[in-house]
Amino acid sequence: MKSTPKILTIAGFDPSGGAGVLADIKTISALGGYGCAAITCLTLQNTRGVAAIKPIDVNFILKQIQTILSDVEIDAIKIGIVPNKEVIVGIEGILKDLRGIPIILDPVFAASVNNFKFLDKTSISSMQDLLFPLATVITPNLDEAVLLMNSDKPAGIDGMVQMAKKFYSKFNMTEGQSIYLKGGHLKSEVLADVVYDGVKTKKFTISKINTPNTRGTGCTLSTAVATLIPKSHSHMDACEFAKNYVKGAIVNSRNFSAGSGNGPLNHFYELI
């Protein structure tokens, strides 16, 4: 068991601090890990939404990753925003040769606050073909799963379970891989997440939390899974611990404010 797991996040930079690599590093630190980051893009955004994105040169992104991997013994990798096909191809070229390092893929296609698009259809297709097979856990939210599956949004928990199983089959996921389907976009007072590993299904249900401070929830959840997998007995355990951590970070953000829009989580609530 790793007492201080070293986590590499490959993701974008949110200058307002609620999402992207800044949220990832906060999460890793709060959960007792050591965080490293390779930045894939710069963004113009605040709590009200994303205004623009500027991809980092692909060769510079890959050199960031290679430089870290050549020096730090990384225990898990989280992948967030990858801004185009060239970056996806380059990342796959590096990560496909790694052995034994869990990879958590958060397929971020658009900003939740104002639906600003990060990826085009060609890039999404490349992610499916190249990065899905490498991922230990894939963490789409409902909207992302609906887009990937070209299906209707499920109305409840049973529908989410069926969607998770169909997702696993459609993308030829195999033993050792899991899908973590996030249900925060369900139109219900009871929200559910579903984890499916090809055999076992686990459902996490909570009552809807009345707070606008949900910015970066997806980034935080996927990074929490990456940080906790090296410290857990199974993917399912890591996913459950991550869900509980994120729930606490949302609940304890109620009295916290950082902007006039969709505020950030309280990542360090357990230390306060």
Image (cartoon, rainbow, N blue to C red):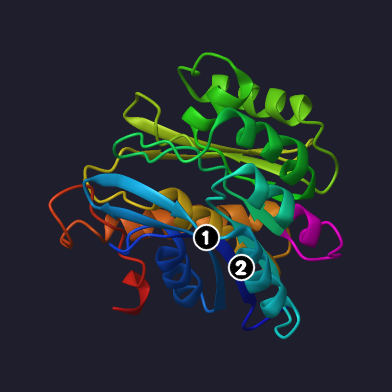
Residue 33 visible in rendering: no
Give amino acid for label 2. Phe
Residue 85 visible in rendering: yes
Q: Nearer the viewer, residue 27 or 69?
A: 69
Residue 245 in the figure: left or right of residue 63:
left
Give the residue pinned by disc 2. 60
Q: Secondary structure at mark 1?
A: loop
Asked if the residues shown at circle 1 and circle 2 are in contact, with their CB atoms under 8 angstroms apart, the answer is: yes
List x then y, in percent, for residue 183: 46, 34
Q: State the residue at coordinates (64%, 52%).
A: 87
List x then y, in percent, for residue 8: 62, 70
The magenta stretch spans residue 100 = yes
| Magenta span of residues | 92-102
Say the numbered circle drawn on residue 6: none
Give the residue pinned by disc 1. 56
Q: State the residue at coordinates (28%, 57%).
A: 264
The vertical placement of 96 against 198, above or below, is below
Q: Quadrant of the C terminus?
A: bottom left
Local crowd size for mark 1, using a 10 Å CA cut-off: few (<14), some (14–19), many (≥20): some
Q: State the residue at coordinates (73%, 49%).
A: 89
The magenta stretch spans residue 260 = no
List x then y, in percent, for residue 194: 58, 36
Q: Nearer the viewer, residue 94 or 135?
A: 94
Which of the 4 quarters of the picture holds residue 69? Answer: bottom right
- Residue furthest to the left in view is 260
Dominant secondary-structure state across the stretch colored magenta: loop
